[in-house]
Image (cartoon, rainbow, N blue to C red):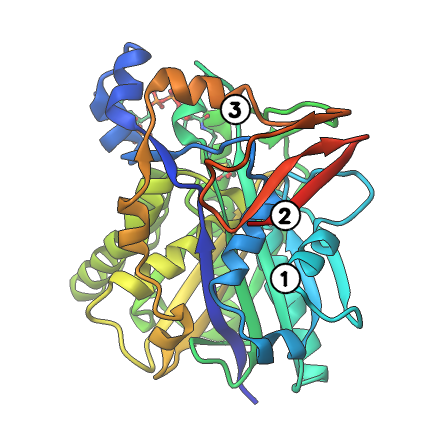
């Protein structure tokens, strides 16, 4: 039985800051951001959006009533959780109108979380092929204003529906994974911005890639020439480019050119959104599937997932004939183009307006065009609604 990704949905708020303007405001050469880091625009998150609303907005684009009937497990991967106790998945299930006869949980391991969710979801579907699992990767990447990490912020949510006989990507069972206790990036309880040893984290990312790739090739016998595209966790798109260069260093020229071309399609949307932590790898998959003109049924796609702290996995899947249908007719190029550019001053103001641990504050959500919004907090309870 084939098990894998049946549908893929994405949401990011309709605001962005231009990286050239941000570079000027920070006295940096714009090419450092555009080329050196590989980011062109960065998502700006208004206070009326958080991981729950972004996840609901992403999932809404893909779920039919039949899917909702079949879903009996929701795995919400995030490192931007809004409660230490209650799972974001419980709010999400209610907002989406899912059955009450489900399991709904939150999962955490930095940017790796959604990959763990997808792997666990496959095992669930193998036991219960008539069921589907909704896996979410939703985050707001925050390092702080005027920090080296600032140009690698962003945010959004990806919704992945896992099922039997998937429309998009049938996942291989064999994969390679690796965990080691590393302090490259972390966010202690109570802190609203991540702490990071930036250069070290980039080196560890490449070291973990080397490790899981070697282990993967030993386990499967597959080589780089067997892949039509390889995707990377993209904290900033130059990071993925470094990963690709490492993998294709010894590849034959034809494979190297093919993989480099597909990588450009795969990083297109990430260049316009920034890091969405758990969702970044899956936004890259969506970008590849929407933008590539070469890929067709039978193509093998490799996925490198990395989460600081640190944990990595390399796995792969085979593209299915109906893969375009899994995007449900969404034109994400247009969605991203239609966003409103905010000035650097407005971005800074919105950055400081995110609601954390607030007892009571009501928000004017009417300007937010998204379906699901955060209307405020009352007595420490977050008020979500669809409008
Ligand atoms: P920095 O120190 O400001 O930048 O921080 P830099 O000086 O290293 O420059 C960046 C690149 O721009 C360099 O290229 C420069 O040469 C180039 P590289 O050597 O890397 O190839 N450059 C230029 N290029 C063209 N024209 C110019 C120019 N000037 C410079 N004029 C850093 C950069 C990424 C470290 C920082 O933004 C940061 O700390 N970001 C956050 C951490 C991060 O994203 N780490 C990635 C790996 S860890 C990970 O992926 C997990 C994560 O997603 C979290 C999780 O798992 O939850 C982060």
Q: Which of marks 2 and 3 is nearer the N terminus?
A: 3
Front label number (2 vs 3)? 2
Measured in 3D between alpha carbons, the distance from the residue under mark 2 to the one under mark 3, in whole angstroms, is: 28 Å
- Residue named by callout 1: 96
Q: Which residue is drawn at 33% across and 57% down?
A: 287
Picture quarter with the N terminus? bottom right
Q: Quadrant of ligand 1?
A: top left
Q: Residue at x 34, y 26 (%)?
A: 342
Rendered location of residue 238, percent (x, y): 32, 38
Which structural element holds mark 1?
A: helix
The quadrant where residue 139 appears: top right
Residue 2 seen: yes
Q: Is mark 2 within 8 Å of ligand 1?
A: no
Give the residue at the far bottom of this rendering.
Answer: 1
- Foreground residue, 184 or 129? 129
Measured in 3D between alpha carbons, the distance from the residue under mark 1 to the one under mark 3, in whole angstroms, is: 31 Å
Residue 244 relative to residue 203: left or right: left
Label pair 1/3, CB-CB below 8 angstroms: no
- Foreground residue, 358 or 110? 358
Q: Does the residue labelled 3 lie within 8 Å of ligand 1?
A: yes
Rendered location of residue 43, percent (x, y): 40, 36
Instruction: Judge whether 53 appears above or below 260 on screen.
Output: above
Measured in 3D between alpha carbons, the distance from the residue under mark 1 to the one under mark 2, in whole angstroms, is: 11 Å
Rendered location of residue 319, percent (x, y): 38, 77
Residue 98 relative to residue 312: left or right: right
- Residue named by callout 3: 143
Which label sits on residue 385? 2
The quadrant where residue 365 appears: top right
Which structural element holds mark 3?
A: loop
How would you rate the neighbour count of disc 3 (Cα within 10 Å): few for under 14, some for 14-19, many for 20 or more? Answer: many
Q: Is mark 1 within 8 Å of ligand 1?
A: no
């Amino acid at each position: 039985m084939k098990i894998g990704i049946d549908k893929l949905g994405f949401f990011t708020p309709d605001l962005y800051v231009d990286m050239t303007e941000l570079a000027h405001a920070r006295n940096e050469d714009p090419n450092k951001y555009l080329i050196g880091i590989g980011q062109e625009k960065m998502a700006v998150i208004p206070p009326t959006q958080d991981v729950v609303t972004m996840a609901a907005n992403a999932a809404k684009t893909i779920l039919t009533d039949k899917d909702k009937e079949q879903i009996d497990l929701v795995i919400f991967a995030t490192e931007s959780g809004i409660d230490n106790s209650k799972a974001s998945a419980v709010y999400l299930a209610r907002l989406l109108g899912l059955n009450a006869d489900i399991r709904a949980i939150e999962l955490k391991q930095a940017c790796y979380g959604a990959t763990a969710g997808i792997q666990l979801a496959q095992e669930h579907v193998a036991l219960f092929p008539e069921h589907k699992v909704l896996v979410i990767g939703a985050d707001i990447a925050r390092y702080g204003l005027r920090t080296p990490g600032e140009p690698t912020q962003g945010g959004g949510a990806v919704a992945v529906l896992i099922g039997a006989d998937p429309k998009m990507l049938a996942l291989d069972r064999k994969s390679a994974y690796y965990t080691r206790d590393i302090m490259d990036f972390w966010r202690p309880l109570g802190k609203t911005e991540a702490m990071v040893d930036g250069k070290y984290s980039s080196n560890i990312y490449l070291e973990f890639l080397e490790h899981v790739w070697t282990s993967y090739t030993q386990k499967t016998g597959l080589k780089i020439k067997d892949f039509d595209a390889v995707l990377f966790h993209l904290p900033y798109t130059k990071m993925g480019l470094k990963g690709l260069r490492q993998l294709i260093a010894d590849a034959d020229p034809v494979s190297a050119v093919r993989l480099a071309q597909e990588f450009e399609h795969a990083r297109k949307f990430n260049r316009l959104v920034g890091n969405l932590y758990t969702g970044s790898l899956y936004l890259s998959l969506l970008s590849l599937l929407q933008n590539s003109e070469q890929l067709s049924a039978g193509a093998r796609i490799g996925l490198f997932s990395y989460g600081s702290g640190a944990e990595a996995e390399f796995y792969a899947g085979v593209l299915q004939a109906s893969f375009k249908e899994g995007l449900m007719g969404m034109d994400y190029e247009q969605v991203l183009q239609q966003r409103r550019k905010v000035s650097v001053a407005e971005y800074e103001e919105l950055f400081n307006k995110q609601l954390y641990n607030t007892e009571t504050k009501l928000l004017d959500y009417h300007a937010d065009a998204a379906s699901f919004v955060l209307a405020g907090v009352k007595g420490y309870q977050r008020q979500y609604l669809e409008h």
